[in-house]
Image: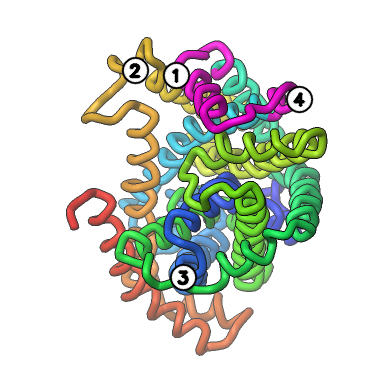
Amino acid sequence: MKNRFSRIGFILAAAGSAVGLGNIWKFPYITGEYGGGAFVLVYLLAIMFIGLTVFLAEAVIGQNAQANVATSFIETSKSKNENWKIAGFMIATGLILLSFYSVVLGWILSYVFSSFGTLPADAKTAGAAFDTLITKDLATQLLYHTLIAGTVIFIVLKGIKDGIEKINLILMPFLGIILIGLLMYAISLDSFSKAVSFMFVADWSKINSDALLAALGQAFFTLSLGVGTILTYSASLPKEANFVKSSIMVALVDTGIALIAGLIIFSFLFEAGAPSAAGPGLVFISLPVIFSGWGLLGKIIAISFFVALVFAGITSAVSMIEPSLMFFIERFKMTRKKATLLCGSVFYLLGIVALLSMSTTYGSSLTFFGKNAFDLMDFASSSVMMPTAAIVICLFLGYFVDKTMLQEKFTKHTSVLFFNVWYFLIRYVVPIAITILFLNQLGLI
Ligand code: PFF
């Protein structure tokens, strides 16, 4: 394979995949809902023991086989059993995720442009504007979904090195600069210390089983696990590269950015006297109102904030489609162009179904099992397919792969103790934790 990441390119691209709407939008709002500090601590533990474990699992499979998801499973299995191609189902998850992720990124892009105009002065106006966008303004949504999808397709068409690595090389530093700028402004506010204690002083009263499961689900989503993305990216990492160190660095960057985003957003919310539990409307309703109260500076902050979100989201979006591209290119001998056009059309069209399903006009005809198509895609991918894949990955490595081979791969870069802890987590702890998460998400426990 000539089209490979450099080591730093891999770290940037994997961090680009991990850092997305999950960090800057979802992490702050669920932290707010579950009361702050204690939830953050639980989340950090989930990242360290469960998220990083599965991340390393995907990385070792990809690095070992240097191929697409299906072939990598077959090649890594003890018996080289062809049936493991079934693990290729993961590639569908990325396409489903990408279809509505692109729609949401489209909303955010539209907020970049609308922030140049008048920002809404109160929650009612902001809520109504958002509601109009998603339920009535189909043309705007379609336009921005098309712009995002077109950008993603354009980037991945160019391949791993010239497309994905390059865009991460440009967007990730920009994202870092914008976030540092916003953090410095947040530090200058009186409410910064309140935000710090909200996020780092534990109040255990809000921690219940829902909070634990939310932390676990978020750990998976934020590290881009269970989609074959990390596996596929690792397959393009140079064979001798230290995948353990790279994986730890990606988890650290991802966690650092989530914490910084949380500090920024809670400083803003507290400064405006807004509640910490703003829910999913945080980014689209609460923040614009706060920015509107800050005059011209607020406008600049609003634009920078939404641009940061778009950048973070684009680098995640390209990583969702790459597993399917590699799969079709390698297993069906398609050209990259053909694979991109095929997978690009699938997610673009599904995205249109998702956005229509939220509209007042088409909503009822695109509602199945009591959920509109948008929510259904979210549920199927994040709550069913990602955890299923994570369980498959753990059981595969724990029971169907030669332990000595795995140990050799790990101990080239780390200690035997590290490997043993990882192996124990993969065999027992993580599958049990995910099964519980899974049953809960299906409403069975
Ligand atoms: N990690 C991304 C985020 O936090 O927004 C979401 C994501 C990207 C999930 C890529 C899955 C994936 F394959």
Residues rendered magenta in the picture: 112-141
Going from the N terminus, do you reach mark 4 or mark 1 first? 4
Label pair 2/4, CB-CB below 8 angstroms: no
Label pair 3/4, CB-CB below 8 angstroms: no
Within 10 Å of the Cα at label 4, are there few (<14), some (14-19), or many (20+) other Cα atoms? few
Badge 3 amino acid = Ala
Give the structural element (helix, strand or loop) at label 2: helix
Give the structural element (helix, strand or loop) at label 3: helix
Going from the N terminus, do you reach mark 1 or mark 2 first? 1
Query: Where does the image place residue 283, in percent across and percent down from the top left?
Result: 58, 39
- Residue position marked by numbered label 2 in the rendering: 363
Give the structural element (helix, strand or loop) at label 4: loop
Within 10 Å of the Cα at label 1, are there few (<14), some (14-19), or many (20+) other Cα atoms? some
Instruction: Look at the image and tell me whether residue 57 can be seen.
Output: no
- Side (left or right) of 327 relative to 18: left
Going from the N terminus, do you reach mark 2 or mark 4 first? 4
Badge 4 amino acid = Phe
Query: Where does the image place residue 83, in percent across and percent down from the top left?
Result: 31, 51
Mark identifier at residue 135: 1
In this rendering, is residue 177 above or below 144? Answer: below
- Residue position marked by numbered label 4 in the rendering: 116
Residue name at image x 76 percent, y 50 percent? 182
Marks 2 and 4, how far apart at CA: 31 Å
Label pair 1/2, CB-CB below 8 angstroms: yes
Query: Where does the image place residue 300, in percent across and percent down from the top left?
Result: 80, 36
- Residue position marked by numbered label 3 in the rendering: 38
